[in-house]
Image: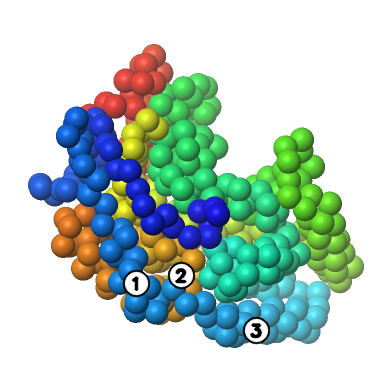
Amino acid sequence: MTALDSAPTSTAPLVPGSLLSTIRNHKELPAGFRGTTSGPTAKPISTYTALLARVRDAGLLKRRTGFYVTVFAIVTACLAAAVTGSFLLGDSWFQLLIAGGIGLIFTQYAFLAHETAHRQVFESGKTSDRVGRVLAAGVVGMSYSWWTSKHTKHHGNPNTIGRDTDIDYDTVSFLERDAVKQRGLSRLFTQKQGYAFFPILLFEGFNLHFMSYKTVFGRKKVDKRSLEITMITIRFAVYLGIIFWFLPLGMAFAFIGVQFAIFGLYMGSAFAPNHIGMPIIPESSRVDFLSKQVLTSRNIRGGRVMTLAMGGLNYQVEHHLFPNMARPHLKAASKLVREHCAEHQVPYTEATLVSAFGTVVNYLNRVGLAARRPFDCPMAAEYRPR
């Protein structure tokens, strides 16, 4: 079983005293916080099992295959409409509007692949992997194996140094110890990286496709390698072939550029608010499952419109606590989780999308300040009070 399948039902929440102070450096917690314990007499206090039982008794872990089939049909109808509109427009720069729309549509397919991989659609793991691979590799053009491996590590240890690859350095420094290592132009960029973060997401679509190809053609073991290479290659051959056959060369390149840019910006904007700017957990710390998932996650307000726009990722806390929970159940689960967290004094974070984006920018700029002190010890920078 992986983190994509379901959450654990037991934990061993022994937490060193340094953890709480480290978390406080990133986000002030209310007095009397009891999400973790420490010291020689520390006792497990996780109440996740009780919460899980309430959620299961409420029927919130049931699959909703019909819902996802309906969403898939609607998204596919939108894609068909976009393709039809493109053919009707012909040689026109209004094609770039179609390109932007297709970027949004491919992101919706990516959300469906994400939910399928989490076993939210089908009971069978094999069926989930087959359908998820078709959606990811055959439709979106990304390696399913690469993404599930990366995403499983994230779910198991969100915002945990050395364990969550989502906070590893990659153009942007999410940790001060990485920011302080930058030199030259990278150092100058890092100092104001928060302001550059969202513009950089315009290139994330290219990066995701590049990393997929790099993985499937690399030396590391990849499940269904030949199948993924075939699916991704055919997908791009058909997609690019139609564009370059139908549109003039310059317009074809512009079409692809806009589609990739919107895809990357949309994907990144949906995932960025979930954890960036939330507490960072030291690598050697042990935290109970419920506290770890709730403390490091942020929900986004906005109701049904936001749930549609973010593919259910706006209920990030619930998604991390119950990875295999179908999208339609997340709202009801959030009420139970909020009540549970309030009862046990575990901070539950929820914000508007604009506020969350502001937090992301401010946090990254704050981390980037470490690049102004290039001779600081990385370890000292990581634990420097703010």
272 w.r.t. 86: above or below:
above
At label 2, the amino acid type is Met
Look at the image and tell me whether residue 257 can be seen. Answer: no
Q: What x and y, as percent, mark residue 307?
A: 43, 73
**x and y percentages locating residue 86 in the rendered image:** 75, 78
Of badges 3 and 1, the one in the foreground is 1
- The one of 51 and 367 positioned closer to us in this rendering: 51
Question: Mark 3 or 1 closer to N-term?
Answer: 1
The three-letter code of the residue at mark 1 reads Val
Asked whether residue 169 appears in the rendered view, the answer is yes
Give the residue at mark 3: 73
Quadrant containing the C terminus is top left
On screen, residue 100 versus residue 318, left or right, reads: right
Q: Position of residue 197 (x, y in %)?
A: 47, 46
From the image, tell me which residue sits under label 2: 325
The mark found on residue 148 in the picture is none
- Cα separation, mark 3 vs mark 1, equals 29 Å
Q: Nearer the viewer, residue 172 or 295?
A: 295
- Which image quadrant is residue 287 in? top left
The tag earlier along the polypeptide, 2 or 1, is 1
Q: Is residue 209 left or right of residue 190?
A: right
In this view, 104 is above or below 370: below
Q: Secondary structure at mark 1?
A: helix
**How would you rate the neighbour count of disc 2 (Cα within 10 Å): few for under 14, some for 14-19, many for 20 or more?**
many
Residue visible at 77% across and 53% down? 224
Locate residue 239, reporting x and y percent: 81, 66
* Residue under pointer 1: 55
Assign the N terminus to one quadrant of the image: bottom right
Question: Which secondary structure lies at badge 3?
Answer: helix
Going by the numbered disc 3, the residue's amino acid type is Ala
